[in-house]
Image (cartoon, rainbow, N blue to C red):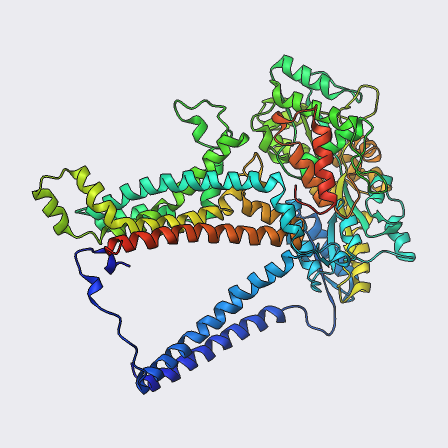
């Protein structure tokens, strides 16, 4: 090996490699809209398969007439994945996010970290005017408003009219499980270890008069938690437990109900249009009732979901972003989201429009459910709290109601202190 | 290592020569350093810096959502992790998956290696066919197994002798079984390849000599093939054990979030670091995983060192 000769190619190659590396880095950072002219407003939100968000974006861009241009950045439908992506980017002060399609449970977390900006003065007025009380609560944190409520969501008790009698609005979980066991059919729920399990448990706890995290942010675990665990355990160990219960999410529940194995299903309204895909006959046989009660003498507290739109603190075009958010979340687009995407509106008056009434024969029940819904804990450490609840109440068949209170309190304390659980 | 594993050759005969510091030797050494330098620098940047940064973060109380509360807490995060039952349960789960899957892979891999080694016709197609699972993307393979064992969409519950409601993914032992199965299916070819390289080192003359002496096939396998392959086997076991201990992707797909008691240490690290964005605590877990992996490596390398020394007849 000649020493001198080997030198030059070696150096050349390193230089080349550095060039390529440098170019790649520069390319990676250099993307983004051009500075002059119409600002591009990037809206990060889940991919709504019905096309209603696309429609809203197109409509707003037309109306804006060059003042801004919304670019719809589609996120996965899984709420955990959406949050991980958004949080990671905001923590890195990424200025390519302008608008965030914010799940109702993120408000405290994003606001607490000051990753989003509050809606003040005239803007606050526009964002909150005419909205339902439940969804409105989900944009509030520390006395400020952090987003505009766009779509809401809640779960109903769906049943087969041709198989079981109308459970009515006062049915309890016990009654439903007992009826299902007698009929040899199943009750569809969401009990995989994910956010949906927190939704279920939180609603049952609230239905017994409890609140896992109190108004001032303190962990508050009592007898209502035991009530919830008792129902979960009862269903999981009964003949009414659906196959694969401990791994079932919304879609597995929908498929189970459509496959005729169950007479009852707890789920969001998206299952209603989907039922038409099985057969018109099948859709006709679906009845709806209010979310079941945890205890006989207390009204149920259905879950509350939905999307609010928030403006990022790192956005370079905040004024345009506020205007774009107001446009996206307006009444017209809420009605489109209800029709095309099966997403219930947050503005009261939209429920009275003919289009929404036609899309939702159960619109009135939907509204009372949202009005009576139990919000999930409002705390910046929500994600930790939710993970702790999921871990404690999973798998459903091994939940022991007798020591659940101690177990949950221990996990929640550790979660609140930022410890491992 | 490969050359040293042939005991008949007298490797000890070459005494260590004193390095003569001639000009030529010196300039060659300088050249060697300069040739290595870019690689060393790149390694430092891409591995040294992140590891150092992780260690630094692990000594902080640092949650991305509460940047104001950032402070130096020394080894408190490590105390937290090591005193929690979650960590030790997860280490147990990881070790169960690692030991069972690597053990099965070793046996199967050896059988496949022997087949590949002895295949008289169609050697190429046989090897290619065996390697296919290793060529499939882990996430894709994990989804395939997950769906296969799903009672509504999978084929497993429809097989004869399997009850129609068979849903292994709804309990812990069943989930671990599927995860281990997916691991074994996926990486046995890798094991077989490494073992095949070892098999190729066993000289045929030894087998012929043993045959003349009247040794049976089994005797030849255990007395000649295995001892001569020992270094290759240890390398294969080392690689696979390290991989299996860090198991993330297939377990994450088959049982999202480590549900049903399948949380491995890597999934715990992911949950704390990525989902809870608790950089301090999460980095402590990452560093502990790193230390565990180093321990496994040291264990194997010590074992490996001893065995190669044996081969050379130095012990």
Is the N terminus of chain A in the top left, top right, bottom left or bottom right quadrant?
bottom left
In the image, residue B273 sits, relative to residue A93, either above or below, namely: above
Please state which of residues A400 and B32 is positioned toward the viewer in this rendering.
Answer: B32
Residue farthest to the top, as pictured: A182
Is the C terminus of chain A in the top left, top right, bottom left or bottom right quadrant?
top right
Please state which of residues B114 and A325 is positioned toward the viewer in this rendering.
Answer: B114
Residue sitting at 49 percent across and 37 percent down? Answer: B146
Please state which of residues A8 and B245 is positioned toward the viewer in this rendering.
Answer: B245
Q: Say left or right for A40 vs B224.
A: right
Q: Total number of numbered labels?
A: 0
Dividing the picture into quarters, in which one does residue A172 lie? Answer: top right
Residue farthest to the left, as pictured: B212
In the image, residue A205 sits, relative to residue A421, either above or below, namely: above
Residue sitting at 27 percent across and 46 percent down? Answer: B113
- Residue A200 shows in this picture: no
Image position, residue B301 (x, y; %):
38, 54
- Residue A287 shows in this picture: yes
Image position, residue B44 (x, y; %):
51, 68
Dividing the picture into quarters, in which one does residue A37 lie? Answer: bottom right
Image position, residue A141 (x, y; %):
84, 48
Dividing the picture into quarters, in which one does residue B257 lie? Answer: top right
Residue sitting at 72 percent across and 55 percent down? Answer: A57
Image position, residue A103 (x, y; %):
73, 46
Please state which of residues A211 and B228 is positioned toward the viewer in this rendering.
Answer: B228
Q: Say left or right for B199 vs A326.
A: left
């Amino acid at each position: 090996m000649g020493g001198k000769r080997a030198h030059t190619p070696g150096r050349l190659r390193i230089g080349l490699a550095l060039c390529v590396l440098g170019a790649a880095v520069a390319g990676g950072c250099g993307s983004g809209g051009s500075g002059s002219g119409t600002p591009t407003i990037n809206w990060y939100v889940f991919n709504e398969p019905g096309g209603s968000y696309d429609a809203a974006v197109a409509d707003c861009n037309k109306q804006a007439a060059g003042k801004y241009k919304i670019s719809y950045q589609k996120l996965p439908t899984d709420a955990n994945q959406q949050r991980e992506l958004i949080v990671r980017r905001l923590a890195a002060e990424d200025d390519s996010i302008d608008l965030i399609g914010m799940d109702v449970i993120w408000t405290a977390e994003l606001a607490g970290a000051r990753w989003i900006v509050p809606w003040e003065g005239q803007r606050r007025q526009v964002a909150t005017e005419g909205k339902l009380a439940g969804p409105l609560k989900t944009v509030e944190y520390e006395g400020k408003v952090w987003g505009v409520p766009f779509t809401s969501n809640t779960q109903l008790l769906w049943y087969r009219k041709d198989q079981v009698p109308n459970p009515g609005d006062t049915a309890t979980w016990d009654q439903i499980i007992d009826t299902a066991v007698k009929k040899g059919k199943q009750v569809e729920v969401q009990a995989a270890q994910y956010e949906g399990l927190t939704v279920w448990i939180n609603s049952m706890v609230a239905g017994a008069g409890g609140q896992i995290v109190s108004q001032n942010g303190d962990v508050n675990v009592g007898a209502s938690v035991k009530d919830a665990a008792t129902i979960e355990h009862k269903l999981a160990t009964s003949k009414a437990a659906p196959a694969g219960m401990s791994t079932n999410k919304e879609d597995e529940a929908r498929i189970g109900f459509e496959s005729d194995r169950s007479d009852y299903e707890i789920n969001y309204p998206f299952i209603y249009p989907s039922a038409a895909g099985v057969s018109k006959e099948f859709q006709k046989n679906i009845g709806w009732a209010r979310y079941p009660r945890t205890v006989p003498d207390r009204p149920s507290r259905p879950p509350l979901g939905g999307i609010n739109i928030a403006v990022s603190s790192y956005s370079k075009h905040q004024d345009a972003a506020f205007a774009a958010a107001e446009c996206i979340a307006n009444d017209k687009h809420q009605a489109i989201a209800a029709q095309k995407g099966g997403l219930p509106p947050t503005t009261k008056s939209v429920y009275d429009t003919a289009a929404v009434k036609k899309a939702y024969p159960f619109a009135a029940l939907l509204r009372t459910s949202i009005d009576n819904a139990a919000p999930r804990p409002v705390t910046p450490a929500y994600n930790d709290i939710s993970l702790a609840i999921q871990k404690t109440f999973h798998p459903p068949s091994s939940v022991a109601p007798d020591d659940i209170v101690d177990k949950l309190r221990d996990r929640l304390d550790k979660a609140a202190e930022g410890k491992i659980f | 290592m490969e050359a040293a594993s042939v005991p008949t050759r007298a490797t000890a005969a070459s005494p260590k020569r004193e390095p003569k510091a001639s000009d030529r030797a010196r300039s060659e050494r300088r050249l060697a350093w300069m040739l290595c330098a870019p690689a060393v620098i790149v390694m430092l940047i891409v591995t040294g810096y992140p590891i150092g940064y992780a260690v630094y973060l692990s000594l902080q109380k640092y949650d991305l959502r509460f940047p104001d509360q950032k402070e130096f807490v020394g080894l408190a995060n490590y105390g937290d992790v090591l005193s929690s039952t979650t960590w030790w349960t997860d280490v147990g789960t990881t070790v169960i998956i690692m030991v069972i899957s690597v053990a099965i892979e070793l046996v199967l891999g050896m059988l496949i290696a022997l087949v590949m080694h002895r295949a008289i016709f169609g050697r190429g197609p046989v090897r290619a066919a065996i390697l296919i699972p290793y060529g499939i993307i882990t996430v894709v393979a994990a989804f395939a197994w997950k769906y296969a064992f799903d009672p509504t969409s999978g084929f497993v519950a429809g097989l004869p002798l399997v009850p129609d409601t068979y849903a292994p993914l709804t309990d812990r032992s069943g989930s671990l079984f599927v995860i281990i199965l997916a691991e074994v299916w996926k990486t046995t070819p890798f094991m077989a390849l490494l073992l095949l390289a070892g098999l190729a080192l066993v000289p045929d003359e030894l087998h012929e000599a043993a045959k003349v002496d009247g040794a049976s096939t089994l005797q030849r396998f255990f007395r000649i093939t295995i001892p001569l392959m020992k270094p290759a086997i240890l390398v294969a076991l080392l690689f696979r054990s390290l991989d299996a201990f860090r198991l993330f992707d297939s377990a994450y797909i088959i049982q999202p979030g480590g549900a049903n008691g399948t949380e491995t240490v890597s999934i715990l690290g992911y949950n704390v670091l990525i989902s809870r964005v608790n950089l301090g605590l999460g980095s402590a877990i990452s560093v502990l995983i790193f230390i565990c992996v180093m321990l496994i490596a040291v264990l194997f390398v010590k074992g490996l060192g001893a065995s190669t020394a044996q081969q050379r007849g130095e012990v």
